[in-house]
Structure formats: structure tokens, C-alpha cells
Image (tube, coloured by chain):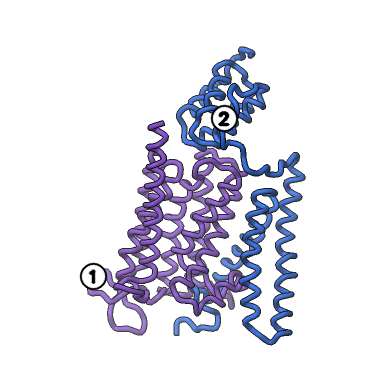
Amino acid sequence: MSEQQPDPRVGEYLAQLAKGGASRRVNAARALGNSGNTSEVVLTALNTAAASDPYVYVRREARNALIKLGQAPVQGLPVGDEPWHTPHTYTSLKEAWIDVALGFIGWFVANGIVWFAINQWTRASGQPNNFFAGALLWLPCQIILLIVLAVFRNRIALGVLAAVALNLAVTLLLGMTTQAMCGIPFFVQYPP
Amino acid sequence: MNPVLLQIGDVRIYAHGLLVVLGLVTGIAVLVLEARRRHWSKEEVIPITLAAFVGGMIGARVSMIFFHGWDVAPLVLNWFALFDPNVGSGSILGAVAGAYIGGYLASRFVGKPGCACDAFAPAMALAMAVGRIGDYLALEDGLGKPTDLPWGVPIPGVDYLVHPAPLYDSAFNLAWFGVLMLLRDKPVMQNGNLLKFGLAGYLVFRFLVEFVRNNPVLAFGLSAQQYFCLALLALLALYCFVQAGRQRLLTAA
């Protein structure tokens, strides 16, 4: 282990790793891993965090930091610390942005096709309730798909969320110029 | 009180819609400042904020089924109606619950440790303080029940004064924003505790102010909104109880 002149911020990270809240401890472990500092005090702190921090995300980040510093963690992975899934690792910003765009555009395309199909089905059957039934089928599918994407390809999920959020934001902006009240349909005159 | 705040040519700008948007913008501004102060990375803040916004909007609409009955289901479960500006935003209680769920799920998916939500607590309080002014200007639900109190306000169509319930809400949220800002750095108010405390405070207030609002009574003199508040408070209490038990086990080990 090399003895390097500690960066003044390393002291701050070590203090955060020892006594900060969970978010700060994770950020501190990540920052120590990125610092390239392999002094004994840093490695000891990271090994201690990897072995005995009460939060699994801190333990994982400390382990990742040690691996990044070229050091094998002293102790094996505690039971239950292995993530149950392996999310996709984005190797470049371009790849991440492509996935975001895929999710964003894909949401519009998918919903356009599905709602067109539901509309056609409703018209063909002559049953207005079929539209409602279609919504009840499609909405849970969207939510499940979003969760699956968030777990395995989170940038696509981010694109989908951004598409929905943009639609909702436009709704709110348009609501400034309509007679929008909480839950009152457009065909109800308000005030009466 | 003026439902139409201003008119630009032929375009009317309604108070309710404008103040809802202003409230959201205010909340997001506070959230961004707080996230920067807490050194959160944008890779975490952006998805969590987006998810909270989407969850909040969906929660606001879907909760209308709980408050107004299954008759409104064809409207609120219609995906198009979610984006129909004529329908309006929905229930703030549902929005808070939906935002919490959306933000929580997103924080788990991005691997954010602990709870990413403490920054939302003061943001939500200030956003509601602003947004509720729009409800007052738009005479939402007839404002409140009749009153003889000196701060009762007149409304068109009746000859008595009523409680300005949205202003009570706004004043409480403004004060609550101040309280949460004072408490935000306390060690005990980290890892989600500030949001839970903020939420619990609003739920208690909302339960009380419902007694002067015009929402219909569901059972035993309480409205659906009050039962919703009680249910959320019970969930928060249960969560705190379970967490306290886990902490005792960790300490004992």
C-alpha cells in the first residue's frame, strides 16, 4: 500500500464515512474510490465500512471503492449483500442517452398504437365500456413494464418517465387557460 | 376572489391553474436548492423528481375515486383524461401519497441508499402554501362552512360568511415550511425522517381543517379525506414502530 500525501478532502470524506448519514457515507465511499488514495487510513476505513456498515448500499459502495483502488476487500461479501439483479452497465454517455431517447420516443409510439387499437376496437364493437376495459388492461401493463425497465435498463425507464412527465407538465400549463378544477370534468359548468 | 386572474387578449388565465403551476415551480426550485446543498448527484435527483411528479399527478387523480366514489372511475382511470387539462389536477392528499410512492420506488431503483426524500419535505410545504392560494381565488368547494368569526369571508350567491379553509391550509404550510427548514439539519431528521415528520404534521392539520371544509361526511361524522389522513398516519406510525424495533435489534447485536 502506498503512502500518499492525503488530499485535504480525503479527511472530509473519511469523517463523512465514519459519522455521516447513509447518503453521505455512500457518497464518501464513492469519492474515496475515485480519489485514488491508497493510504492505510483510507483502506482501513473502506474495509471497515465494507464489512460492518449497517446499510447495504454503503457496504457495496465501499467494496466497489476498494476494487477501484486495486485492493481486494479483506472480508468476503456478507450474506445477503449480493444484489438480486444485475442492472445494465452503461459504458458511455452516448449509450445512456440513446436509451433515454428510446424510452421517450417509444412511449409515444407504443401508446399511440395501443390507444388507436383500443379506439378501433371500441368503435367496431359498439360498446363504449370497451374503452374503459382497454384502459384497465393497458395501464397495469405500462406500470409493470416501467418497473422492469427501471430494474434492468434504467435509462429507458427514465426516458419513459420523462415522456409522461412532459405530457403532464403540458397538461398543467394548458390548465392555466381552461376551467380546470380538481376532478371536475370539462362538460360541467363551474361555477354552476 | 377571482377565478379568472387575468386575461391576455382572448385567453383567460385562471387562478387555480396558474397557482398550481407556480406552486409546482416553487417546490421544484426549493428541491433543487436543497439537493445541491445535500450534494446529491443529478443521476439520482432527476429520476426521483420525475417519478415523484408522475406519481403525484396519478395519485391526485386516482384518489378522486376514493373521495368521490366509483362514478368518477371512467374519468380518472381514462389515460387520456390524465392529460386532459379540463379535468384538473385532483386531490392534494392523493398527490402527496402518489409522489411519496413514486419517489420511493425511483430511489430504490437507482440504488440510492436510505431515503432520498428529506429534501422534498420543505419543497412540498412551500408548494402547497402557494398552490392553495389558487384554490382560495377559485372558490374551491365553496371555501368552507359558515362562520361568524371575524376572518370569515363572503362568497357570491350566499349571504353569510364562510371559513377561508384554503387560506388556513396555505398559512399552515408556510409556517410548516419554516419549521422544516429549521429542523432539516438535525441528526434525528435524516434518512427520511424529515419527510415523514413533515407529512405527519400536514396530515394532522388536514384532519382538523376538514371539520370546516365542505367535503361530504362518509361515516361517523368524518369525511373520506379525514379517513385517508388517519390511514396514512397509521401507516407512518407502523413504519416508525418497525424501524424502532429494527434499530433495537441492531443495537443489541
Is residue A17 shown left or right of residue A113? left
Q: Are marks 2 and 1 in contact (CB under 8 Å)?
A: no
SS category of the residue bearing label 1:
loop
Packing grade of label 2 (10 A; few <14, some 14-19, many >=20) is: many
Is residue A20 shown left or right of residue A29? left
Vertical side of A103 occupied by B6: above or below: below
SS category of the residue bearing label 2:
helix
Measure the C-alpha gap from mark 2 to mark 1. 58 Å
Front residue of B3/B98: it is B98
Vertical side of A48 occupied by B81: above or below: below
Packing grade of label 1 (10 A; few <14, some 14-19, many >=20) is: few
Q: Residue at x 62, y 28 (%)?
A: A65
Place of residue A141 in the rendered image (x, y in percent of width and height, measured from the top left): 65, 64
Place of residue B96 in the rendered image (x, y in percent of width and height, measured from the top left): 47, 59
Place of residue A187 in the rendered image (x, y in percent of width and height, measured from the top left): 55, 83
Q: Residue at x 50, y 31 (%)?
A: A53
Q: Name the quarter where the N terminus of chain B is drawn.
A: bottom left
Front residue of B32/B221: it is B221
Instruction: Using the rendered view, name the quadrant where residue B163 is placed.
Output: bottom left
Mark 2, residue position = A29
Vertical side of A133 occupied by A123: above or below: below
Q: Chain of mark 1?
A: B
Q: Which chain is purple?
A: B
Rendering colour (chain A): blue
Tag shown at residue A173: none
Mark 1, residue position = B150
Under mark 1, the amino acid is Pro
Under mark 2, the amino acid is Ala
Q: Name the quarter where the C terminus of chain B is drawn.
A: top left
Of discs 2 and 1, which sits in the foreground? Answer: 2
Vertical side of B65 occupied by B200: above or below: above
Q: Chain of mark 2?
A: A
